C-alpha cells in the first residue's frame, strides 16, 4: 500500500508540470527530455524509473533515463510503455517502471498516454 498522495494524483501533477514545459517549448530538446523523466521519478512515489527511447531506422535508441537513487533494473516489477507518435509515424517510446507489482491504474495510463502524445506533437 502506498503512502502519501493517492494513486494517480501524483502522476497527474507531474504530467501537468511536464505538459506546461512542453507547451512553453523554450528549452533544448535534450534538457526538456531529461526534465520529463526526472519529474516523473521525483514527483510520483511509485515511478522508480523513467526512460525515453527514439526510433532511428531499425533501432530503438535510449535518449534519456532517470531513476530514483539505489534502484536497480532487476528490482523493477511493473512497466508501462507508451508510443510517442506524430500523426501515424511512431517516433519512440516513453517507458515508466516501478518496484511495486500492479501499481499503475487506468488514470495513470491515460495521463501518461497524453504526455507521450504531446511529446510527439511538440518535439518534432
Image (cartoon, grey):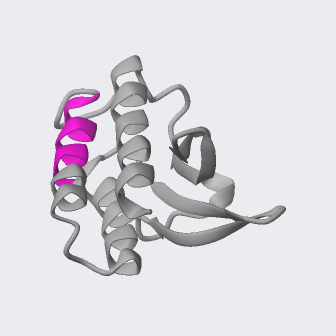
In this view, 86 is above or below 114: below
* Residue 42, image quadrant: bottom left
Q: Position of residue 90 (x, y in %)?
A: 63, 47
Q: Is residue 86 left or right of residue 58?
A: left
In this view, 9 is above or below 58: above
Q: Residue at x 37, y 29 (%)?
A: 108
Queried whether the magenta region covers residue 10, the answer comes back as yes
Q: Position of residue 70 (x, y in %)?
A: 48, 69
Report the predominant secondary structure element of the magenta stretch. Answer: helix
Q: Position of residue 61 (x, y in %)?
A: 69, 69
Of residues 18 and 89, the one drawn nearer to the viewer in this rendering: 89
Q: Residue at x 53, y 61 (%)?
A: 52
Q: Which residues are magenta?
A: 8-17
Of residues 92 and 101, the one drawn nearer to the viewer in this rendering: 92
In this view, 22 is above or below 110: below
Q: Residue at x 36, y 57 (%)?
A: 41
In this view, 91 is above or below 59: above
* Residue 113, image quadrant: top left
Queried whether the magenta region covers residue 105, the answer comes back as no
How many numbered markers are drawn? 0
Q: Residue furthest right?
A: 58
Q: Is residue 68 left or right of residue 87?
A: left
Q: Quadrant of the C terminus?
A: bottom left
Amino acid at each position: 500500500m502506498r503512502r502519501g498522495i493517492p494513486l494517480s494524483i501524483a502522476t497527474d501533477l507531474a504530467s501537468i508540470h511536464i505538459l506546461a514545459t512542453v507547451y512553453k517549448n523554450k528549452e533544448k530538446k535534450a534538457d526538456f527530455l531529461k526534465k520529463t523523466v526526472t519529474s516523473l521519478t521525483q514527483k510520483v512515489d511509485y515511478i522508480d524509473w523513467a526512460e525515453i527511447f527514439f526510433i532511428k531506422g531499425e533501432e530503438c535508441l535510449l535518449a534519456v533515463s532517470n531513476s530514483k537513487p539505489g534502484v536497480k533494473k532487476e528490482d523493477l516489477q511493473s512497466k508501462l510503455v507508451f508510443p510517442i507518435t506524430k500523426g501515424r509515424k511512431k517516433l519512440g517510446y516513453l517507458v515508466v517502471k516501478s518496484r511495486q507489482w500492479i501499481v499503475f491504474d487506468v488514470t495513470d495510463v491515460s495521463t501518461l498516454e497524453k504526455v507521450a502524445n504531446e511529446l510527439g506533437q511538440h518535439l518534432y
